[in-house]
Amino acid sequence: MATEPGAEWTVVWEQAGPGADLNADLAVSLLQGSDIPVMRIPPSTGPVLFDGASGPLLPVRLLVPPEYEAEARELLQET
């Protein structure tokens, strides 16, 4: 039986506040463009709770499978 996505995935990026939603979308594009599977929580199509000018109340996280963690972190640090 296949493991549910995200069950063993690793958080490689996390941000809250102004710009977090847009920055997460950009980071997802970068990882996907490098053939790295990525899961965004909350998804860009899902509801995001905002507190007004400060951005999302909850952090936006990007997760990747463990075997892609080092490559994903390196790519994200370069940007």
Image: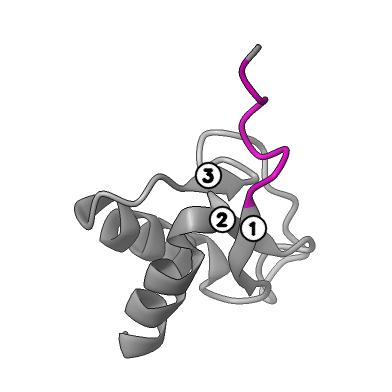
Q: Quadrant of the C terminus?
A: bottom left
Q: Which residues are magenta?
A: 2-9
- The foreground one among 31 and 19 is 31
User: Label 1, label 2: how many angstroms apart (C-alpha)?
Assistant: 6 Å
Please name the residue shown 28% across and 62% down the image.
30
Residue 71 covered by magenta stretch: no
User: Label 1, label 3: how many angstroms apart (C-alpha)?
Assistant: 10 Å
User: Can you tell which quarter of the image residue 77 is in?
Assistant: bottom left
Give the farthest residue toward the top: 1
User: Can you tell which quarter of the image residue 16 is in?
Assistant: bottom right
Residue 7 covered by magenta stretch: yes
Mark 2 is on which residue type?
Pro
Mark 3 is on which residue type?
Met
Give the farthest residue toward the left: 33
Label 1 CA crowd tier, 10 Å (few <14, some 14–19, many 20+)? some
Identify residue for label 3.
Answer: 39
Q: Secondary structure at mark 3?
A: strand
Identify residue for label 2.
Answer: 66
Picture coordinates of residue 65, whole percent (x, y): 53, 49
Please name the residue shown 55% across and 69% down the image.
20
Disc ID at residue 63 = none
The reply to whether dot 1 and dot 2 touch (C-beta < 8 Å) is yes
Please name the residue shown 43% across and 63% down the image.
22
Magenta highlight: main SS: loop
